[in-house]
Structures are given as structure tokens and as C-alpha cells.
Image: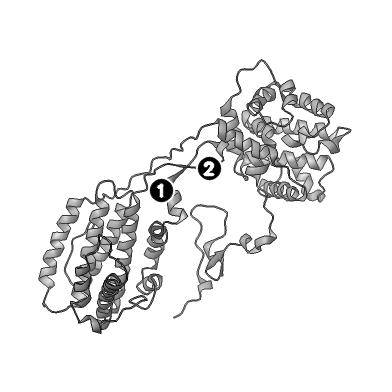
Amino acid sequence: MARNKNSRKKKPSKSGKNRTALLDHKKVGSVLQPGFAQFGDKLTFSSWSNERLPEMLWAAVIRVVQDQDFAIAEFKRVIAYVSEHSNKEKLSDLSITGISKLDEELRNEFLVFLLSNPVTASALTVLKLFKNLPARESWLKFLPSTEPEPELNILMAAVGMCLPHQSQEATDCRWLKLMLMVVAGKFQAPQEMVEPWFKYPYEGDQRSIRPSIRSCEMAFNPMVEQDLTWSNNFWAESWENTPCLELIPESDVKSEVRDCSVDEIQKLRQELKQHWGKTHSTTGVDAKHDGVFGIAFYALSTLTEIASIGVSTGILARLGLRTILETHISLRYLIQKNEAQLWTKWRTYGAGQAKLNALKFDELVEPPKFINTDTLESIAGEDLWEEFINIELGSWSGADLRKCSDKAGLKPAYDQYYSWSSTFTHGTWGAIREVCFNTCGNPLHRLHRYPKESVLPDTLQDACILVNEILNDLNEAYPSFKSSLIGKK
């Protein structure tokens, strides 16, 4: 019975991330679009981490120098100062750039007030590190001059904790920015929305208050023209003056399942060869027998290469894993159909590919060094005179691999192994990113990528699991072959 795709149940997210589920993406042509992407050019982007965090750097430093209670107390002190000031409208923007644009007298007055707390003043000496800090002379005039060298670790912690725009630390800083606009009369909102902001973060349902703070702080930004000079200078100076740091992941918990060795694979190959002899019944063309055992031998050969020293954690192992998956799906599909004509079609397709390439190398281009054209000629004509062999330009089954996997009941395996391993085959950005670049652990570099040869997660166990499935199918077609690589069959 046909199943309506809309009736499929959405599985809960394992990661717990708040994002559009795969089944909720809208298919537009060959593209799957999440909700926000469907708005296209109607959206105006504004980045907290790239643009607005550098402007609230002084607040971010205060937020991490001690605990949240200390930071909120300091922020409320600043909010009260602005709300009671005769020129509060001018003090609605206390970003780094906003402070620099204040009249010198008002700017000096605010900096004296801000730095009157010794803990805050000491922490904010990190601002001395930036030569392009707006109104740097004013900051230097009031920052402590007897302090030791500014602590880079404080700066890195401030940026690192506030870089994720939904983090508690970032939300606290965004709350301060929003509240300054509220008390200065620059931001109007319904009383039922504003009132909980004054009690933040100690009263009310923070699960709704925090998102309202972030959305309003973000919504106000596109309404005003942005001066990105300081933001750009901040990230540029941070890049020039601090080193890249390596992120060291936590050690993976090793599987209790033991990986196979090359010797074990070779032993299994000999057992398979013996089983081939016991089930081989004719020297004529037997498309099914050759196909079943050929796929199994081919998978074992691929697995042997993956199991070689240093290969299983590299690029080629992922290509091999995809190859084993494709042979697994093809074999399961053929065995389930179990039609003599289909076995012959699968075999003839391969002969047609040999013929196609033989003709190309005979008429159009020179063969590469790794190809023996005599071998291609032999494969093309060994079952039937090649003049009777058609060249199939599509799939041998008439369906792509995904559809074959669905018909063979292997769609879960296809979803597990095919898509990401294919990116390594095609050399697209995702694979290149995983192999060639690491994420920098220096928050002042915005978690950028830097070149480094990576050791990838090991593929050997996955490859062994797929080969076991191939051997299970072989046993179904030609009993009784009980040997396997991992666990019991």
C-alpha cells in the first residue's frame, strides 16, 4: 500500500537543537528549504557576533570577569545612570562607537562613572590592546595606569562566552543594550513586554523573556545605519595580534566491537573461495553465481585496502565505504528480485561499460596508464560478441541507487552511509572542510578555519558491518556460509 509521505512521523532530535526538522523543509525543485530561507531577499541580516558584539565589548568583559550577579549589578548601575541623566537621549547608544561619538565632556563623564568600580576598571584595561579603539585617548585617560599588562585571557573569555548569540552571557549584554534604549526613550514597546525586562533575569518566565530581549535588540539594529569601522578593526587586530589555537576534542569512547585485521580478512577470503568451489556447478555463463560471489570478493578486496595501515582514517577509505554500500544495495536488490533476466542485465551492463571505454580509447582519446585496453576488450566480448552488446547509458536497474535501496529495504543504510561519503568522492566543500581545515580555538578569531591535515574518524568498523551484510546475502543465495567479520551472524 502506498504511504503518504506527509504521514511519516517526525523523530525527536537527538541533538536537542532548535532547528527546522528535515521533514519540515520545503522541496523547491531539487532544493530543500528551511522556513527562513523561503523569505529570500526579503530578509535583512544583522550579525551579533560579527558586528554588534565588538561594539558591546566593554559589557562582555564585565560579564565574564566575575559572575552573572556582579555583571547584572554593574549593568543596572549603568541603566540607572542613563535613566536619571538630563541628556539620557544622547546616552541611548553606549556601544564602543556610540561612546566615541559623544561630546567629549559627556563621554568623559560617562567613562569616569563606568570605571568608578575598581573591578570593572581593572578588567577593562584589555581595551588598551587595541590601537584602533574609537576614542582611545579618552579610555586611556581614565583606565588604571598602574595595572600590570592587560590580561588577554579575560578578553578571550569575554568574546568566547558571548560569541554564540543565544548564550546567557550574550543575552545579558544584549539586554543591557536594549534597556539603555528603553530608558532613554529610543525604543517603545507594550508595557506587558517591557515590564519583565526590568526584572530580568531574576523574575518571570525566562524561557519567553530571553527570546523577546534578543529579538527586540536584533530588530532595532536594521532600523539604523550601521558604522562597522570598529567591528572590522576589532576582528582585524585580533587576527593580527593573537595566534591560532588548536581545539582538542574529548577522546571518543572506543567501541566494544573489535575491528578486523588484514589477516582475518584474508582468512575469510580463503573460506569464501572454498565455498565458491562447493557451489560452482558449470563452466558456462552463470550470471547469478558470478555476481553474488564477485560482489562479495570485491567487497572484501575493498575492505582489505581500507584495513591497511593508515588508510581507514583517510579520504580513500570513505570512497571505499561508499563502494561497499553500493555493492551491498545492488546485491540485496538482485537477490530479492531473483530473476535470471535481471542477473544477466546487471552483468551485460558491466560488459557494455567495458565496451564503451574500449571504443573511446580506440577512437577518441589515449588511455591513461592505469588502464589495460586488452582487458577492457576481453570483458566487453567474453560472454557475447560485442556487436550484440548494447551500451546502457543510464542505470542497469532502471532506477537510481536511492530508489534501489528503498525497494531492497536498505533505505536506512543508504541514508546512513551514502550522502556524506559521496561528498568525498566529488570533492565538495563539506569533505574538503573536514579533511583540510580545523576550527581555531581562539575566540578572537571568530572560530575561523585554518589549514591542517586532519585524522578522520575510522571507517573500518562501518565497512566491516556492511561486508557482513553482503556475506549474509551470499549465504541466503548459496547456503551455508557462516563466517563473518564482526560478532555472530
Q: If you read the primary sequence from the N terminus, does the residue marked by circle 2 or circle 1 appear first?
A: 1
The amino acid marked with disc number 1 is Val
x and y, in percent, of residue 371 in the image = 24, 63
The image quadrant that residue 446 belongs to is: top right
Q: Which secondary structure lies at badge 2?
A: loop
x and y, in percent, of residue 207 in the image = 65, 48
Q: Is residue 475 visible?
A: no
The amino acid marked with disc number 2 is His
In this rendering, position of residue 444 left or right of residue 389: right
In this rendering, position of residue 388 left or right of residue 99: left
The image quadrant that residue 143 belongs to is: top right
User: Badge 2: how crowded within 10 Å, few (<14), some, or many (20+)?
Assistant: some
Q: Is residue 315 above or below residue 234?
A: below
The image quadrant that residue 44 belongs to is: bottom right
For image coordinates 81% across by 51% down, the residue present is 190
Q: Which secondary structure lies at badge 1?
A: helix
Query: Residue 261 bears which disc, if any?
Result: none
Taking the view exactly as shown, the residue that stands out farthest to the right is 86
Q: Nearer the viewer, residue 361 or 412?
A: 361
The quadrant of the image that shows the C terminus is bottom left
> Disc 2 designates what residue?
448
Taking the view exactly as shown, the residue that stands out farthest to the top is 146
> Disc 1 designates what residue?
435
The quadrant of the image that shows the N terminus is bottom left
